[in-house]
Amino acid sequence: MDDTVSPRKAAIAARAFKDGLLIEEAPLIGVIDTDALRGTIDDLRSSFPNFFQHAFAAKANTMPAVLNLIRGWGMSCEVASPGEYQAAVRAGFTGGEIVFDSPAKTNWEINAALSHGATLNIDNFQELARVDAWLAKGKSKSIIGLRINPQVGGGAIAAMSTATLSSKFGIGLEDGDNRQQIINAYASRPWLTCLHTHVGSQGCPLDLIAAGIAKTFALAQEINASLGRKQITTLDIGGGLPVNFESDVVTPSFGDYVAALRAGIPGLFAGEFRVVTEFGRSVLAKAGFILARVEYTKEQGGHPIAITHAGAQVATRTVFMPDLWKIRVSALDAQARPKKGPKVVQDVAGPCCFAGDVVAHARALPLLEPGDFVMLHDTAAYYFSTPFVYNSLPAISVYGVSGPDQGLDFTTMQQEHALV
Ligand SMILES: *Cc1c(COP(=O)(O)O)cnc(C)c1O
């Protein structure tokens, strides 16, 4: 794990401290470098041909300020719950710019999506029957698809792998007579014009993702061929590009992903289908970090421990699955500048009242002292944006920052100082 603080991040942290953003009442903040975010989105859009439409997976970060920026920079929005749906609507995404995926859509949610013209990816045959019932009574502008599970297997993190044999998502392509049932479903429903898959998130290698998309692409072609008409016009290939949590290097890049898709499924780039993607983590994770004050330090059983304000409430997966979700933590001094000094193996713990609340176990860092700060890298997706309400800890304030290192401009994205 490379805990070097880049000059950009060092400049941002030092300015945040100087500007009084890290105050007694706010010993923990989130920061999003919106220039970096914009750069990532530009890279995403320029790495793919123009007929790819990129929907941001809102579960990675539903903060209104973030959704607003992302919409302004040309992405649409993938949502998977009524809360995310509402957040997307509030951020100004129109029905046609929203893709609604969820394995547990209620009738109310189906009605909302179909009335607003959101793209609806149906998860299973029971949901399909509900959509049939809705369409028997009403008319919808929605693009409607089926989510299939290509059953190509899992990646390094079982909990993030959605294309295993027994995953809870989509219709298992290899099970029983599902393949034929899917073809029949399209044959009898001209309004089914989309086919969707999402192979998994973090931990899925590119060749696994490409294999899942290849099966989906082949199925779409098979369905159209068997119907003798070009009924499926949209392929939604999901998200899941993994993020490198080991260093600042972006790997794999969107360019690597496109290369893997071009090698495995050249037809995807022929323009036969409009293609939708649903990236979340890879769009946002590396654009942000957490800064947290070290409140106390101690030595227990000869083991140094720093008690900071960043724990399970903002780094939930890392705390509960420390081996699978290691993140980089850097030591900063009392003015939030990179801390120097010999490295000492220590634990970096959080404020929650349970013993496992540790964000870095036995990590070699300059020895932390009370009043210092720590930086938790790559945490703008699924970390401070997805808080765990435990101990009624206060919600976190988040700042956006842009501009040159010497003239940084901070804006408040989410203000929350009050202790509950
Ligand atoms: C979570 C999810 C995504 C986004 O995954 P990332 O790993 O954040 O890119 C996209 N589509 C669906 C259906 C998801 O559940």
Image (tube, rainbow, N blue to C red):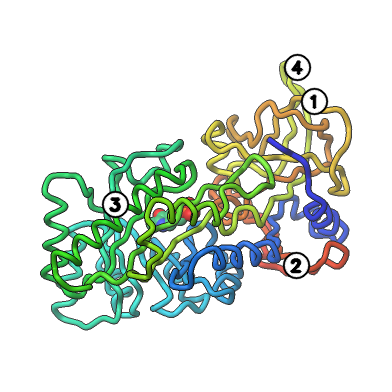
Q: Nearer the viewer, mark 2 or mark 3?
A: 3
Whole-Å distance between the Cαs marked 2 and 1? 34 Å
Q: Residue at x 80, y 25 (%)?
A: 344
Between discs 3 and 4, the one toward the N terminus: 3
Mark identifier at residue 357: none
**Image disc number at residue 402:** 2
Using the image as rendered, state which of residue 299 and residue 368 is in the foreground: 368
SS for callout 2: strand
**Of 394 and 364, which appears nearest the observer?**
364
Q: CA distance from mark 3 to mark 4?
A: 55 Å
Disc 4 marks a residue whose amino acid type is Gly
Is label 3 within 8 A of ligand 1 (CB to nearest ligand atom)?
no
Q: Which mark is residue 215?
A: 3
In the visual, does 23 lie left or right of 158?
Answer: right
Image quadrant occupied by the C terminus: bottom right
Which residue lies under the disc numbered 1? 344
Q: Earlier in the sequence, mark 2 or mark 4?
A: 4
Q: Is residue 148 left or right of residue 242?
A: left
- Tell me the residue that label 4 is attached to: 302
Q: How far separated are the C-alphas under marks 1 and 3? A: 50 Å
Q: Foreground: 137 or 325?
A: 325
First in sequence: mark 1 vs mark 4: 4
